[in-house]
Amino acid sequence: MGSGASLAAAGAAKGAVCTGVCLGGACTLTLGAIGGDRERIEDGLQDLQAGASELLRGSAVVASTATAVALVTCAGSIARLAESGPKSALLGLTEAPAAAMEGAKMGPLGAVAGALVAAHGQGGSLQQRLQRLGTAARAERERVLEEVAALQIRPSSGSASLPLWQLAELSWAAYAEAEVDGFRRDLSGLRDPEEEVEAQMSIFLRRGGSGSADLAVMVIRGTADRHDTKRDWHSVVLGVYPGAFVLTAAEVVRMYQEQGCEVMVTGHSLGGYFAEVLSTTLGLPGCAFAAPGPGSHLGPLEVPGFLVVNHEADCIGNHNCDLHMQPPVYLLDDGVLLLPWTAHRMDRMLQSMKKRQDWTNLTARQLCAAEPEPSIPRVFPGLRSRR
């Protein structure tokens, strides 16, 4: 069997397993709803969340999204049937498709979340849980901002700069555990899932020349294991504020600043989401690649030396596309019909950045704005570049 066929078979097997997890979750949720067992309902919802999340990370994005939407619609309606009766459950079934279409504007995860909330109803326990999560997230963000202020971290001077291809190379190296020319990996793989620091961060250090400070680049890896997937669901989809991660990263930034280093931040996908949260909270320059929008998790600082670069065809990274501090720069390399999972890959982003050797985190927007305007319909607001 060729490598392509092997990959397709592996993808199909994974899809079958994830669908099974979703169906098992739906059954558990049904039994819990019938028996009034809240713990079983929670277990079923967790299985549905995990299975749907893995389906959306698979290769067949459209089919996987449709499958996940159908499953969560059924599950939400079953729970609504137990809570409010058949008439209310039927209403949830009819409202879910429109809610999924509306949520799809923010990406496939938005479609799933919209369908689940609509099917379960505005007065159901799921909606109440989401409201509680939103209230808790706002309170946690305010608490973290107060603790960060007490650390007295210096916002960027505005002069720290790197070519975007180098920041992309560092983001790719976070997955490959590779070394990068000109940098030394000074801190590797920092994480503590038991303390809700699921994403993995590393520090790459570049020694400064005479009279210039050393440069420390915090690189946050994207989704690569179940701990990352958990944080994807909690923060990107459900809106839980990642307070433990932000405080841990802030301590690391302060440590390197106390050593006289300039600090930048970068990351891909989930790592890009975290990079933008840290940039706007701690005042760090850098770049996020293929990153979903953090929305209410953004800090109070707008840093001119930080930007987001996504691909127009990347429906994964373009989740919550209108919830960045500034509109992203969108790439059109290889066209808008590029497969979404291909458009989301970090190695493809690195290739695109190497075509733009003159782009840095300080100059990319101006250089992109000076390029000829691509003649395509715009799906998202922001600058476009095709090479």
Image: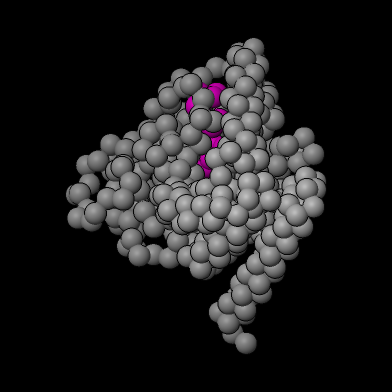
Q: Nearer the viewer, residue 141 or 97?
A: 97
How many discs mark residues in the rendered view?
Answer: 0
Q: Quick check: 342 above or below 212?
A: below
Question: Is 277 covered by the magenta stretch?
Answer: yes
Please name the colour scheme applied to the rendered image: one colour
Q: Quick check: 386 above or below 167?
A: below
In this picture, residue 82 sits left or right of residue 381: right
In this picture, residue 321 sits left or right of residue 266: left
Q: Residue at x 64, y 12 (%)?
A: 150
Q: Position of residue 196 (x, y in %)?
A: 73, 37
Q: Residue at x 64, y 27 (%)?
A: 136
In this picture, residue 385 sits left or right of residue 2: left
Q: Position of residue 325 (x, y in %)?
A: 42, 31
Q: Residue at x 76, y 41 (%)?
A: 193
Residue 106 seen: yes
Q: Which quarter of the picture shows residue 376?
A: bottom left
Question: Is 135 covered by the magenta stretch?
Answer: no
Q: Nearer the viewer, residue 246 or 156?
A: 246
Q: Quick check: 251 above or below 293?
A: above
Quadrant position of the N terminus in the picture: bottom right
**Magenta stretch: dominant SS?**
helix
Quadrant position of the C terminus in the picture: bottom left
Q: Position of residue 341 (x, y in %)?
A: 49, 62
Q: Position of residue 307 (x, y in %)?
A: 41, 36
Residue 179 seen: no
Q: Which quarter of the picture shows residue 187?
A: top right
Q: Residue at x 62, y 79 (%)?
A: 9
Q: Which residues are magenta?
A: 271-283
